[in-house]
Amino acid sequence: MTPFDAYTQYLAFKNHFSKLKYDYHKYAGKSRASIKSFNERKDKYWFERISRQKSDDEIKNYYLANFVESDTPDRLWIGEIIRDGESKYQQWTKRNQSLSYVFKEQSKEMLSEHNLNELLDCSKQHPIILKRLLSGKICIETLVIWDKILLFGNEFDKKLLDPVWETVSLKIKKYSTFLNIDVCDYKQFLKQIISQG
C-alpha cells in the first residue's frame, strides 16, 4: 500500500463510520481524494510511515480498530489515531483473538445478574445491555453479536430517540459488516448460558 493508499483507506473508514449511506464494502474502500490534497497535508509523513510498517490488511485492521474503539467514531480525527492508535489497535487485536471466550464470559456475567427481558427492556430508559457497554463492562463485539442473534437493534431504534443510542446504533450497524463470525455457534453459546442459568 502506498502512502496515498493508506490515506484513502483512512478516509474510507471515516466515511463508513460517520455516514449512514457510505458502505466500505460496497465502494471497495474507495474515497474521493487527490494526490494534491494529500501532499498538502501536514500529517502525510505519518501515512508514509504506516504504509512502510504495516501490511495492507494490518493497515485496514488498524483503522477499523481505531474507529470501533472510539466513543464517537464520526468525530474521530487523525491526530487521535496518531497519538493513541497503536494502543487501541493492540487492545482490539487481543480482544478479537479470544472473541468467543470474551463473548461467553461477558454474557455469563450479564445473565447471572439479569434475565434476557431485563437486559433488553427499553420501555423506561436505556436498556441494561446498553448501560453495560457504556460503562465498559461489555465490549462492542459482544453487543454486536447479541444483536446478530436477537435482532433487537431495530426495536431500540424505534423506542430510543436519543443521541447516545443513535451513536451506538450506527456503530453496531457499521461494525457488524466487518465482524465475520458464525452466528449459529454464538447462538449455541448463548442458549447454553441461558439454560444453565
Image: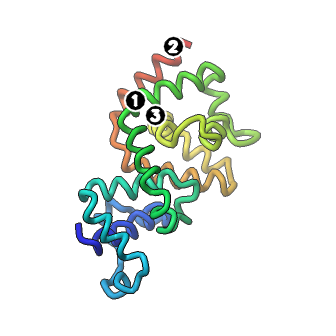
Residue 38, by quadrant, is bottom left
Instruction: Tell me the crowding category of disc 2: few under 14, some 14 to 19, or many 20 or more residues within 10 angstroms, Cα based.
Output: few
Residue 32, by quadrant, is bottom left
Q: In this rendered view, identify the residue nearer to me: 31 or 149.
A: 31
Residue at screen point 66% across, 53% down: 164
**Above or below 85: residue 100:** above
**Above or below 24: residue 140:** above
Position of 122 with respect to 54 (left or right) is right
The residue under label 3 is 149
Using the numbered discs, state the Cα–Cα distance from disc 1 to disc 2 in whole angstroms.
Answer: 18 Å
Circle 2 sits in a helix, a strand or a loop, which is it?
helix
The amino acid sitting under disc 1 is: Ser
The residue under label 1 is 100
| Among the two numbered marks 1 and 2 on one chain, the one whose residue lies closer to the N terminus | 1
Are the residues tagged 3 and 2 within 8 Å (C-beta)? no
Instruction: Tell me the crowding category of disc 1: few under 14, some 14 to 19, or many 20 or more residues within 10 angstroms, Cα based.
Output: some
Using the numbered discs, state the Cα–Cα distance from disc 1 to disc 3 in whole angstroms.
Answer: 14 Å
Q: In this rendered view, identify the residue nearer to me: 37 or 126.
A: 37
Picture quarter with the C terminus: top right
Residue at screen point 50% across, 49% down: 172
Residue at screen point 76% across, 40% down: 124
Point out residue 15 in the picture as x, y percentages from the top left corner. 44, 67
Q: In this rendered view, identify the residue nearer to me: 159 or 36.
A: 36
Circle 1 sits in a helix, a strand or a loop, which is it?
helix
User: Which residue lies most toward the right here?
Assistant: 124
Q: Which mark is residue 195?
A: 2
Point out residue 194 in the picture as x, y percentages from the top left corner. 53, 18
Using the numbered discs, state the Cα–Cα distance from disc 3 to disc 2 in whole angstroms.
Answer: 16 Å
Point out residue 170 in the picture as x, y percentages from the top left corner. 53, 55
Position of 107 with respect to 15 (left or right) is right
Q: Mark 1 against mark 2, which lies toward the viewer?
A: 1
The amino acid sitting under disc 2 is: Ser
